[in-house]
Image: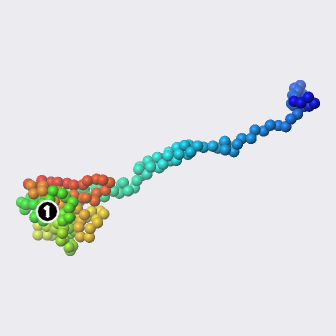
C-alpha cells in the first residue's frame, strides 16, 4: 500500500474489515488447462471401446452359428453316404468299382456326382447306392454340400485305399474344420 492511500473500512455491525484500495486480482485460467487430455488418454479410451466391441462381435457372431450348422449338415451327409456305401458293400461283397483308389480324398476325379441326369464324366458316379437303382440303394438321393461350388458334383469326395477302407470327406467345411470319415468295409 502506498503512503497516501487509506484503507477502505467496512462496518458490519460489531465487525469491521479493512481492505486496501486496489483493483481486484482475477486469475485467468488458460483455456488449454481446463479440459486437457493427452493423446495417451484418448488412445486408452479408444482401445477400451475396440476391445468391448470385439468381444460383443465374437459373442453375437451370426456367421459362426450359420457355419456350425452347415458343418453339422456336412457331417450328417458324409456319414449317410459312407453308411450307404457300407450297406452296398456288405450286400454285394465288394466295394463299388466306381470309387477310385487314392491316398488323398480331395483330388480331381474323386468328387461324387449328383443324382439324376447330370454329366458324371470326371466324377464318381454313386447312383448304385440310390433307391430305385439296380443296386437297390439305401438313400433317396445323394446329398450336396450346403454351399456347393460344382455344377454336376455334390461337393463331397470319396476314395478307397485299396485295403478295404473307404473315406468320404467334405473339403468345403468352414471355420478351419476338417470333415472326413473313414470306414473299414471288410
Can you say which quadrant of the picture contains the N terminus? top right
Q: Secondary structure at mark 1?
A: loop
**Closer to the camera, 112 or 9?**
9
Image coordinates for residue 174, horizontal then vertical, percent:
31, 56
Looking at this view, name the residue that lies furthest to the top.
14
- Mark 1 residue crowding within 10 angstroms, few (<14) / some (14–19) / many (20+): some
The picture quadrant where one finds residue 134 is bottom left
Name the residue nearer the viewer: 88 or 43: 43
Residue 109 placement, left or right of 65: left
Q: Is residue 137 above or below residue 79?
A: below
| Residue that badge 1 annotates | 100
| Residue at the (63%, 43%) spot, across then down | 36
Q: Is residue 24 above or below residue 82?
A: above
Is residue 81 visible from the viewing direction of this image?
Answer: no
Which residue is pictured at 28% across the width and 65% down the height? 148
The percent coordinates of residue 13 (x first, y second) are 89, 28
Q: Residue furthest front?
A: 3
Q: How is the image coloured?
A: rainbow
Relative to 155, is 65 above or below?
A: above
In-image side of 32 versus 155 (left or right): right
Side (left or right) of 26 relative to 22: left
Screen quadrant of the C terminus = bottom left
Percent x, y of residue 163? 9, 55
The residue shown at (23%, 70%) is 152
Q: Residue furthest right?
A: 4
Q: Position of residue 168 (x, y in %)?
A: 19, 58
Amino acid at each position: 500500500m502506498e503512503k497516501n492511500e487509506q484503507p477502505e473500512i467496512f462496518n458490519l455491525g460489531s465487525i469491521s474489515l479493512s481492505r486496501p484500495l486496489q483493483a481486484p486480482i482475477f486469475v485467468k485460467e488458460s483455456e488449454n488447462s481446463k479440459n486437457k487430455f493427452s493423446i495417451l488418454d484418448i488412445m486408452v479410451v479408444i482401445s477400451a471401446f475396440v476391445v468391448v466391441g470385439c468381444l460383443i462381435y465374437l459373442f453375437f457372431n451370426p456367421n459362426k452359428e450359420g457355419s456350425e450348422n452347415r458343418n453339422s449338415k456336412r457331417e450328417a451327409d458324409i456319414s449317410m453316404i459312407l453308411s450307404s456305401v457300407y450297406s452296398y458293400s456288405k450286400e454285394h461283397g465288394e466295394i463299388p468299382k466306381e470309387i477310385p483308389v487314392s491316398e488323398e480324398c480331395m483330388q480331381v476325379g474323386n468328387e461324387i456326382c449328383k443324382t439324376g441326369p447330370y454329366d458324371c464324366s470326371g466324377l464318381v458316379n454313386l447312383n448304385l447306392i440310390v433307391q430305385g437303382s439296380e443296386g437297390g440303394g439305401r438313400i433317396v438321393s445323394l446329398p450336396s454340400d450346403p454351399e456347393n461350388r460344382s455344377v454336376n458334383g455334390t461337393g463331397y469326395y470319396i476314395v478307397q485305399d485299396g485295403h478295404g477302407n473307404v473315406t468320404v470327406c467334405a473339403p468345403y467345411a468352414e471355420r478351419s474344420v476338417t470333415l472326413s470319415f473313414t470306414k473299414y468295409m471288410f
